[in-house]
Amino acid sequence: MAEPDAAGERRDRFRRLLLSSVLLLAPVLVTTNTDARETTAKVEAFWQMCVQQSNVDPATDFYRVRYFGADATTARRLMDLIAAGEKTVTFTLPWIYQGHPNLTPVPGGYTVVTDFEGHPELLLRTTRVKTLAFAEVTDEETRFEGPGARTLDAWRKIHWPFFENALKPLGKQPAEDMPVTVEYFEVVCGLSGTRTATRHDESGAAD
């Protein structure tokens, strides 16, 4: 009997994890199995490019796939801010990833960032993660946000309704003591020609 193809099994497991990442973190990216396969293929090709061109560990088994924001315009604006180094932190709710440990941000983990249509453009490496209650977030964390959300007051006004909408499908309500994951990141790879944001962009979009 032939020996099992360990590499093939690893690739299959990786593709299943990648697809689950796309479905959970960016559900509007995929509407059919064909769309999911096409998105996965694009992301895998982008990942391989980054492995070859950047300081990326090729032995990494898993990376997340996501876009930032709740619509195409916001996703583009935030992508540009990240590409320009104007936004180096994001805030999420652990409740959203509950039961999905592979999708939880971890230091040293990678995230492929796509536009709203699922085209990959940036690869991020998570540099630091901490969890605070919503009420404990200060401008020490928010100062790494996009220009329009760097003050604590602006951050709270933007993120409270954003979190409220994110929690509705889970049957939860936002609260001052709800846990918030603060994830710091750096850009390690990007498509040539990725647009960059201007220094005067006053985006206050959440995520």
Image: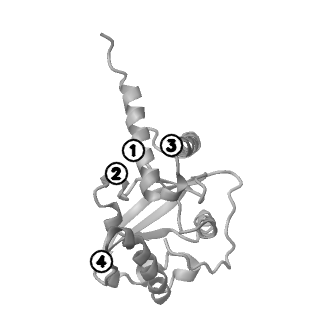
Identify residue for label 2. Answer: 102
How far apart are the alpha carbons under marks 3 and 2? 21 Å
Q: Secondary structure at mark 2?
A: helix
How far apart are the alpha carbons under marks 2 and 1? 8 Å
The three-letter amino acid code for the residue at tag 3 is: Asn
Residue in the image at 52% along x and 46% along y = 32
Q: Secondary structure at mark 1?
A: helix
Q: Position of residue 65 (x, y in %)?
A: 48, 53
How far apart are the alpha carbons under marks 1 and 4? 28 Å
Looking at the picture, does residue 90 appear above or below residue 118?
below
Label 1 neighbourhood size at 10 Å, few (<14), some (14-19), many (20+)? some
Check if mark 4's residue and mark 3's residue have beta carbons within 8 Å.
Answer: no
Identify residue for label 4. Answer: 178
The three-letter amino acid code for the residue at tag 4 is: Met
In the foreground, 70 or 54: 70
Identify residue for label 3. Answer: 33
Image quadrant containing the N terminus: top left
Check if mark 3's residue and mark 2's residue have beta carbons within 8 Å.
Answer: no
